[in-house]
Image (cartoon, rainbow, N blue to C red):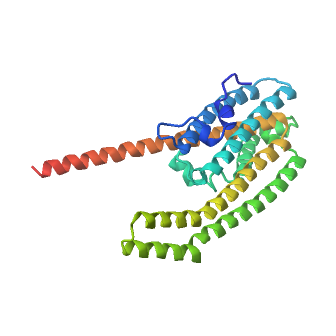
Amino acid sequence: MSELPCPSYDMYHSQPSEYGTSESGSGTDSFHKFFEGWVVEQNQHLKELVASATTELTDEKLQALIDGVVKHYEYYYEAKSKWAKHDVLAMLSPTWRSSLEDAFLWIGGWRPSMAFHLLYSKAGLQFEAKLDELLQGLRTSDLGDLSATQLAQIDEIQKRTIAEEREITDMMATHQETVADASMVELSHAVSEMLRANETDKGGKKEVEERVDSALMPKEEGLEEILQRADGLRLRTLQGIVNILRPKQCIHFLIAAAELHLRLHEWGKKRDTSRRLNEGTSSDEGTTHDLSTSR
């Protein structure tokens, strides 16, 4: 196993308000630091997984590595759960992820059913790569060598996952509609009337803030509940697939999962950086043009 220190493990055992923060003291900044540390550890786990895939290790040693990687995912979701109680909106609109990743998010994370697409994609690639061996009746011990029993078990979990995923999606849709319920429409109108009447004295502002906080609190609590369900399904899906696969197959699945996550995160950050640089260049060129034409 990795000898890399585990800052995410230490940080996860603290309350969000106790975590090291930036100068601004923002809990969001704290989770950003946690996430970046967790990604470093995931990359180290990936190196170990890749090494184990090409080394003859006993099932016991492979299982120990698998257990460590799964535990690392569990730490992530337990830490995220703590932070969600502190700031659920930040968990649903994560600034530590790239725009590319944001575009594919489902309720603050990856869509659970995507795990099955990942599994079948990798299985298909490995099946094609070792087709000759499989036709000869040889065992490849990778995802291209899934048994009929395993496929049936995976199919059953996939059906349950998709059903619960749809249920959570419907929950989110219903909850989102409450933003336009009668209480919110009445409150937004009342506050707008106060602003139009210039009722901006200190007492009036405090009253408005209290009413807004009272109205938004159940909205955020509902979002937290939905996020917890979504994250719970994500983790159970990962655990369910891992429990079906043989150790060597599981190593290949965890490699594919880590590679996809790390590369998307890396590509997205590079694209965001490039976009910001291009916007900065365009802005500078526009300023230069304005100065030259004003002479």
Tell me if residue 230 comes above or below residue 208 in the rendering.
Answer: above
Give the residue drawn at x 76%, y 42%: 127
Q: Is residue 288 left or right of residue 237?
A: left
Q: Is residue 90 visible?
A: yes
Residue at point 87%, 45% (across, down)? 147
Residue 108 x/y as whole percent: 62, 53
x 68%, y 63%: residue: 169
User: Position of 109 compared to 162: left or right?
Assistant: left
Image location (x, y in percent) of residue 110: 65, 50
| Residue at image coords 12%, 52% | 294
Q: List x then y, in percent, for residue 226.
A: 69, 59
Question: Dividing the picture into quarters, in which one does residue 20 lie?
Answer: top right
Quadrant of residue 42 within the rendered picture: top right
Q: Residue furthest front?
A: 203
The location of residue 236, given as percent across then percent down, is 78, 49
In the figure, is residue 144 to the left or right of 111? Answer: right
Q: Where 217 sits versus 139, above or below?
A: below
Q: Is residue 84 above or below residue 17?
A: below
Q: How many labels does the image show?
A: 0
Question: Height in image: 185 above or below 87?
Answer: below
- Looking at this view, is 288 or 249 the one in front? 288
